Every structure is written in structure tokens, then in C-alpha cells.
Image (tube, rainbow, N blue to C red):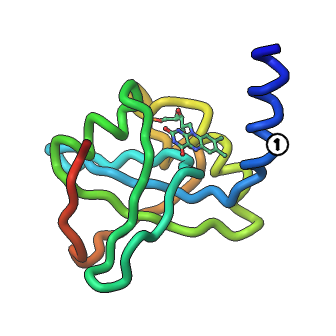
Amino acid sequence: MLKEIKSEIYHLLHPKMAFFLTSIAKDGNPNVMACAWATPVSEEPLIIIVCVEKSAYTAELIKETREFVINIPTKNLVKALLICGKTSGRNSDKFKKAGLKYSSGPKMVYFNTA
Ligand SMILES: Cc1cc2nc3c(=O)[nH]c(=O)nc-3n(C[C@H](O)[C@H](O)[C@H](O)COP(=O)(O)O)c2cc1C
């Protein structure tokens, strides 16, 4: 029964668009994960909520630096997105693994971590 309910919920809420969610370590090394649970909740001020499991390396980095970046993938980046969503950057360089490049950008918002 539990399996049935879980499956129904999954199919009601998915598929969802997924994004690249990039964070950065204090030493300047970036990390990137796939994130489907992201949504804008306010235009003024601009607020975007991302839901990241506590055990993810990304959660650790965001809590540490209070910074993240969201990128919307194009079709040709689907494989890279899956690589970022199936491995942790705790002990590996996912930018290298997925063939992704990064550059620095402007700071836009402050946020709370619950
Ligand atoms: C398509 C897709 C969407 C995902 N969306 C989320 C999400 O919204 N939140 C989350 O915590 N994990 C999500 N994940 C899983 C993380 O990307 C995965 O746990 C990743 O390895 C975490 O990397 P990190 O340890 O380097 O932070 C998703 C995975 C995939 C493939």
C-alpha cells in the first residue's frame, strides 16, 4: 500500500524541470548538483527556494558560504545534469567529470537556511 501511494505522488509531481545548482567551498572550489526542487517565490525582493537534502555536499557548502547559483540546462546538457545528480562532489570534481565550465557572477540575494 505504501508503495502504491508513493508511486502515485511521484507521478503527480514528476517529471519536473531540473537545474544545475552550483555552490562554492571556502577555498574557492565550486561544486554542482542537479536540482529539480527549485522555485521562485518572490520577484521583489527576488527569492528562489532550493530544497537540498541535508547529506548532500551542496547543503554543506551553501550553509558555509550562503551562496548558490542556478543554471537552466539546454537539451545538450542532459547527460552532464545526470552526472551531477548521481555523484557527489565531496570527493570528486563534477565540473571536470561532466565537462562543464564555470565563471564568477554577481551576488544577487541573501537567504535563510532552514
Ligand atoms: C534530475 C535530478 C534532480 C535532482 N533534484 C534534487 C533536488 O531537488 N534536491 C536534492 O536534494 N537532490 C536532488 N537530486 C539529487 C542530487 O543531485 C544528488 O544527491 C547529488 O549527488 C548531490 O551532489 P553533492 O553531494 O555534490 O551535493 C537530483 C538528481 C537528479 C538526477
Residue 16 percent across, percent down from the top left: 70, 55
Residue 113 x %, y %: 24, 46
Lateral position of residue 47 relative to residue 67, left or right: right
Q: Position of residue 43 (x, y in %)?
A: 37, 83
Q: Where is residue 12 in the image (x, y as percent from the top left)?
A: 79, 47
- Residue 75's place in the image compared with 56, above or below, is below
Report the residue at 69% width, 70% height from top.
74
Residue drawn 41% across and 70% down?
41
The residue nearer to you, when weighing 46 against 83, is 46
**How many discs appear?**
1
Along the line of sight, the residue nearer the viewer: 75 or 99: 75
Residue located beneath label 1 in the image: 11
Toward the bottom, the furthest residue is 44
The one of 83 and 108 positioned closer to us in this rendering: 108
Which residue is at a point 29% across and 85% down the rendered structure image? 44
| Displayed quadrant of residue 55 | top left
Q: Quadrant of the N terminus?
A: top right
Residue type at numbered disc 1: His
Image position of 2 with respect to 52: above or below: above
Q: Which residue is found at the position 33% from the left and 51% from the top? A: 23
The picture quadrant for ligand 1 comes to: top right
Quarter location, residue 31: top left
Left or right: residue 66 compared with residue 1:
left
- Which residue extends farthest top? 1
Q: In this view, does 91 lie above or below 19?
A: above
Q: In which quarter of the image is the C terminus?
A: top left
Q: How crowded is mark 1: few (under 14 residues within 10 Å), some or many (20 or more)?
A: few
In the rendered image, the vertical position of residue 87 relative to residue 35, given as above or below: above
Mark 1 CB near ligand 1 (8 Å cut): no
Q: Nearer the viewer, residue 71 or 29?
A: 71
Element under disc 1: helix
